[in-house]
Amino acid sequence: MSEDEINALFGTTTEELDAKAAEYEDGSWEGPLVHHVRGRPSLYDETMTDLHVRVPRSTLKALDQHAASAGKTRSQYVRDILATA
């Protein structure tokens, strides 16, 4: 895909992007400044912590099978179970 095709998908041109970049670089840009956070978005509005549990291998296998049949990851499945406890 060419640069022009990509720009067309976003409804802009290289010239428009260059003009916006020049405004930003010379300090005349008046657009919003957005703080970007690295990593995945938080699942909850509170600090997360780890929970480590040792279980027999057969229990883990069964847990993974249940999670897969529910269309969830192991972590999602366990969080859902704990939320109902």
Image (spheres, grey):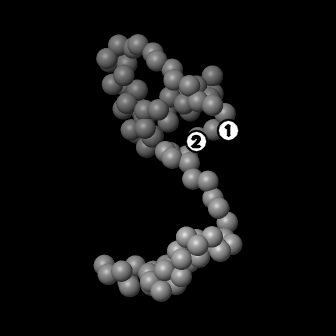
For residue 19, above or below residue 43: below
Residue at numbered disc 2: 42
| Residue 67: quarter of image | top left
Task: Give the residue displayed 47% in from the left and 86% down from the top.
Answer: 15
> At numbered mark 1, what does the secondary structure look like: helix, strand or loop?
loop
Task: Give the residue displayed 50% in from the left and 36% down from the top.
Answer: 76
Foreground of the two, 63 or 40: 40
Residue at numbered disc 1: 45
Q: Mark yes or no: residue 67 visible.
A: yes
Task: Give the residue displayed 50% in from the left and 28% down from the top.
Answer: 78
Disc 2 residue type (three-letter): Ser
Residue 44 in the image: state x and y as whole percent.
63, 38
Foreground of the two, 75 or 72: 75
Crowdedness near tag 2: few (<14), some (14–19) or many (≥20) residues, C-alpha within 10 Å:
few
For residue 12, above or below residue 38: below
- Residue that extends furthest to the front in the rendered view of this protein: 26
Task: Give the residue displayed 46% in from the left and 18% down from the top.
Answer: 52
In which quadrant will I find the N terminus? bottom left
Disc 1 residue type (three-letter): Asp
Q: Are marks 1 and 2 in contact (CB under 8 Å)?
A: yes
> At numbered mark 2, what does the secondary structure look like: helix, strand or loop?
loop
Residue 70 in the image: state x and y as whole percent.
45, 40
Left/right placement of residue 29 relative to residue 22 reads right
